[in-house]
Image (tube, coloured by chain):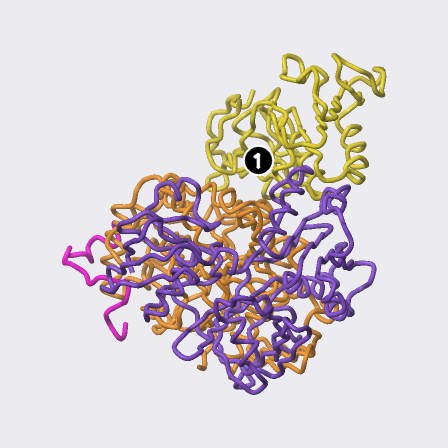
Chain colours: A purple, B yellow, C orange
Amino acid sequence: MNEARTLTLRVQKAELISPSLKHVVLESADRSPLPSVGAGSHIRLSLRENNKKFRNAYSIAAAAGDRSSYEIIVRRVEPSRGGSAFIHNTIDAGQTIEASYPGNLFPPSFTAQKHLLISAGIGITPFLSYLSYLRQTRAEVRLHHFCRLDELETFRRLLLPFSAGEVHLHPNSTRIDVANLLQSHPLGTHLYVCGPEKFMETVLGAAKTLHWPGSKLHSESFGGAHAGGAPFVAVLARSGIEVKVGEDQTLLEAIEAAGVEPPSLCRGGACGQCLTEIIDGIPEHRDHYLSPEEHKAGRAMMICVSRAKGNRITLDL
Amino acid sequence: MLTPTIPSRPRYSPFALVPEARAHLIVAERSDALENQPIPAIDPTPLEFWAVSGDCRAPVGDSILNGVHTSHFRSTFHLLSRLSYRLAIETIGLHLYAIGTEPFIWDVVKLAKQFGMNSDEYHLTHRGSEKRRVYCIHCKTMTDDVTNNIAICAGCGASLLVRDHFSKRLAAFMGVQVDAEVAGEVPAIEEVYP
Amino acid sequence: MNVAFKPSETFRDDFTYRNSDDGILRFPFPFAEDKYMYSVNIEPHVPSGPSPAYEHTFDVDEHYIAECRERAIVLEQDPSRCKVLPHMMAAQWDTLELIMESLARDYPRHFSLERDGAQWSWINRPLGIEQTFTFGDASTLPFEPFEYITRQAQGDFTLQDQRENNLFVDGGMVTTQADWSLEFDIGMTFHEWHAPVPLAHQIGVFDRALKFLLRLQQEQPVRRLNWTMTVNPRLDTSPENYPAWGPDRATVDQENVAQKVHLRVELQTLFRLPRSNAILFGVRCYLASVEELARVTKWRKRLHRVLRDLPEELEGYKGLNRYRGMVINYLAPFDDGAPLSKGPQPDQASV
């Protein structure tokens, strides 16, 4: 598939809403309307710092009805692999940023009769767009958000526009049993989870134990969790170059840093865009896209999250 | 068992309880549907069996039949009506099993979908006649109990060739006028869905 | 871009539909080679191709007004030809936005769209429509948004909801179809919907197409061509009205075959919609009689070869049994067997 056209965005506003959360409003640099987006959409920003290039995907927390702006919220991750620290240190009103066209790998179910949203920390961002959309529908909605005590006020303010009966905040000072939230929901309920990998595993694990059918479970994680690992060398056969992949970067990031731009989209092992054939070497699969049989065959890999087993892998790039 | 010839022809599986259920509800077109079926004697998962007796004088209500909590209904409509009230108050984790002929199975599925159940929450077992419900594509009339390759439409009288194309929403096969191009050009009629 | 419309032509009764010389040359001839077989022939829907028909997101041609009128006639007789399941409202607005924006951008002399927040003003000059409405509020339009805008577009459209790793055809406007029924198929999965197509399932065409479409991205639409043949320039060859058009097939003889039999090409386009994450599937139908196509030297030879060597299963599925031989007989004398250039382009500038 052809690589999508890019957007040039200007930072309209950037402010810290907590010591580690930055709220950024992006508008089209030439004032033309931005592409329409739906609940759960994300945008991938291309960030450059010195010689380093990052492409990070962020959920669009809100989009203006007249298509004039997108809002994202970025958490500063320590240690930052790039991107989040850059946004926190450098991004300010007036700056321009290149971005891909929006995509959506986490849309709501349009057939659901009730939506149960469970998030933790910065995992709230896709659900802010969900809440805006769902209040135009007749479906019932409940959000349970888990956060650190020192960020409780920040999230309370973010959720202020939404009905108090629909949103519930759980600071980690209160012990709450996730299983309680998952019981006795009507048949037409769908469950959505977004947050740190471990949190999602806990919630989805509890849902499975409590007999939720797989078709009603939805989750999204971006980057971070699947990054790093032992360093190795990737040989790009068609380009005729060797790329060193460090322990704190992904294979795709290393390839892009070397000037090769394979197609990619979600950068989370879900969308299938960066599927790459392996000529030699053994992959360590970390994606959600290929089937178990394809993983076993080891003929292709998703280079955004997967790495090499051993110190060398040769790719058809 | 019915074997699909084209991909819209539904597949059915032999009856088996799924381990991931919180509770099982089995609805059947006949009260002998569970005879010789693998129902575990001791299973902590709640199980109910609803069956149609097809007899207006037969006792209606609940009983324990072969150790299974059983509810009896006078007709399929009687059963489907009660099922809609039940699904409205049911919660996640219920698995629904339908055993019977195709029109019955798909009427059950239609209800299940209406109450938000997905295809991994219901399980379908074909039992009994292969007779078809046929939807006349020209006049929108349903003709039931079709056993021949050619059916006469109950609505417009057309001779309908019963295509193997099946609509789960209508719970019916498509019927298309067989002699539309040249009137009277009708193939030999034979019983193909006993 | 200015199109000279032919508003009075008909697709029923007296069948006055004809292609102008330019219309013949811009016909999206589907055969790039002398042989035809199913494939996942999907390519990016970019504004270029072997015919001007590919140059815009939605092609508007000389038949626009007549086709919209034909659609209105079909809907008058059978309103169920347009049906959208209730959970597809976001997809309805997505469709309206995509079609209005594309037409206004690609044909500014014929269509205009002004937006002031949620207040939209739409002008369709060929059909004489001016409409002000509130985007997102269906009560401000005379029809639901999907029906409203597809009544003003050529070709059929369906809406696919993506869930459970599948696509469900959960809505559509289907009045110019090649023998499939929206009323019957609505709600089906991708494979169920395509069930009656022979051969293609066995070679995995639909498995691969589905996997591809599940990953289709916003702003990266794709297209493919499909084809069949139809007796008379009739757009509504629905199973619903088979009793009306079926008898046409028996009226073809060696004398009238070139005027009666039409090649029917579907330019199929697929768009990922932004709010609903649904896929809009456009099926734009082009008709040209064998006689019209025979005015292009390359096409009359290639059409002859394709039909002559067509697998029997496809002849049956496409309903060509009664007249394929007559079309071949008509075209055979034009075909000297000389090699033809690769690709579907006409290789001549006038007819």
Quarter of the image that includes the N terminus of chain C: bottom left
Residue C68 appears in the rendering: no
Residue receiving disc 1: B173
Task: Report helix, strand or loop for mark 1.
Answer: strand
Residue in the picture at 22% in, 61% down: C342
Q: Magenta segment, which residues?
A: C329-351
Residue A201 appears in the rendering: yes
Expressed as whole percent of the image width and height from the top left, the position of residue C20 reads 38, 72
Is C338 magenta? The answer is: yes
Please indicate whether residue B3 sits to the left or right of residue A243 in the image. right
Image quadrant in which you'd find residue C115? bottom right
Expressed as whole percent of the image width and height from the top left, the position of residue C222 reads 43, 62
Q: Amino acid at mark 1?
A: Phe
Between residue C270 and residue C348, name the one nearer to us: C270
Quarter of the image that includes the C terminus of chain C: bottom left
Between residue A192 and residue C30, name the one nearer to us: A192
Chain holding disc 1: B
Vertical comparison of B100 with C33: above or below: above
Between residue B194 and residue A278, name the one nearer to us: A278
Expressed as whole percent of the image width and height from the top left, the position of residue A130 reads 68, 62
Is B152 magenta? The answer is: no
Image quadrant in which you'd find residue B124? top right
Please indicate whether residue A194 sits to the left or right of residue C237 in the image. right
Residue in the picture at 77% in, 59% down: A169
